[in-house]
Image (spheres, grey):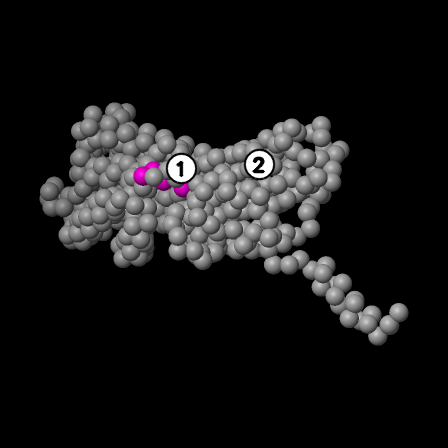
Amino acid sequence: MNFRALPVLSILIAMSALPPFGRLAAVELFDGRGGSLVIKDYLLLESPRVERSHLDLSSATPGVQNYSGGYLPSNMQVSPKMYTFKAAFRVDPSLKDLDLSLYMGLAEYPLRLYLNGVEILSKGRYIEGHYNSSLRTVDSIYLSPDLLHFGAQENSLVLEAYPLYENWGLDRIYIDRRSVVDAAVFLRNFVGVNVIQGAFVLACIIGLYFVALVFFERQKYGKYIVFSLICASFCLAYLNVTVHNDANNEAQLEALSKGGLVLMSSFLLVFCCEFTSVLNKKRIFPLASLSLGVAAAILVMTRQSKETILALFGWVMNCLIVPQLIASIAILVYAFVKNKNRSVMPLLFSFVIVIATAAHDVVFLDKAILPYAWVTAYGYLAMVVAIFILLAKDQGRLLYLKEPKVKLSLDAKGLAEAERLYISSVIAGKSVKEVAFEFAVSESTVRNTLSRAYKKLGVTSKSGLATLAEKYEIVK
């Protein structure tokens, strides 16, 4: 044997062991002992859209490449097109009697999923004239033992994606015991969709309550009306999440929802002005901002395709919504610092939550990574709840003031005639000087008389008398 050839032979053997371009990594075995089997290595092919045309995708297929996450490639000019993802895995024979499920994460395009050539999931619609891609829920797909191969034989998992222009990567896909997958799916859908649907109903009820309050009690409180409009715009903003299903026209829902977000920021600015009484003498500013918001919302709502809706909404976001939110915060800060209005603190805190949740979503949007949940909706929900608490407290105070007060007799408290007269004048809002002028006595006489009267009433000052007058109807 020629030993000088050994190094060359070793290099050739090592190179043959490396996976070539378009070849799957070693097929993983799921035995249930190491946790979930996460499907992360795929063969990927971009091709013209023909369903089931590449279920037999292999490393020898022209144009195939390895994929393990990130943006989808876009090398073809043909449209419509599809992306075929293929992965392989093995299942230990000891798991044949266990219930296994596949966790299918979120997706931003219609898709079909096949296991060993059998379709096990179809989501979204992509027929001509009807495209529905925003898939709001994750799924637990039961893997029947009749469909699975156990032991050395590989299982083939193929996903066909049919995007129009979306280039998001795949969300998490894994296999585990059915109970584990079902629990994970419930929690993610609860956080991502179900809470938003509950918030939609809550906002409807709260909004209708304040409309009824204004209508039936004939209360002319502008902030109640504006808050009702905030609730209505919140419901509109998340209509696409609340009533979403594959049969809906996605473009229409998206247009209404994005228009609702524009209206919501405009109504929030008007509410901040109304609640704090800032700019009461310059109403032209909030009214002009509201007019711009309504006009922008109409423009967004009249777009016909999801792509144009999102493009226009991005422009409106930067040029209108962000400045309106900044102006709202500035008004609240001014009311807190300059006017010492501490009641704005819950509202200010809710704006902080909106900013934090929006920043979270912007980061994931920028990276084109699907998060555990889009959370900006929770920021706006916190704001709706904060405003509701403020107005409910205000309404409670008004109801308290309307309740008949218990009468407090000054005569029964042992006040002399002069004391009763002076106390009544002070309650009416008159100063010591005005009382002295009214009764033609000196100011010192008034102060001494009031001091004796305060002691008999159990208070020590004019502020204490005011508190007493709020609680009781003081009569002579």
What amino acid is at disc 1? Answer: Arg
Q: Is residue 130 at all visible to an observer of this figure?
A: yes
Q: Position of residue 59 (x, y in %)?
A: 60, 52
On screen, 58 above or below 146? below
On screen, 113 above or below 217? below
Residue at (50% x, 40% y) in the render: 52
Q: CA distance from mark 2 to mark 1?
A: 21 Å
Q: Quadrant of residue 459?
A: top left
- Looking at the picture, tell me which residue is in the foreground, 269 or 254: 254
What amino acid is at disc 2? Answer: Gly
Q: How many marks?
A: 2
Q: Position of residue 61 (x, y in %)?
A: 56, 52
Magenta span has 178? no
The magenta span reads 129-133
Q: Position of residue 302 (x, y in %)?
A: 23, 44
Are the residues at dot 2 and dot 1 in contact (C-beta closer than 8 Å)?
no
What residue sits right under mark 1 in the picture?
A: 125
Q: Is residue 393 at all visible to an observer of this figure?
A: no
For marks 2 and 1, the one nearer the N-term is 2
What residue sits right under mark 2 in the picture?
A: 117
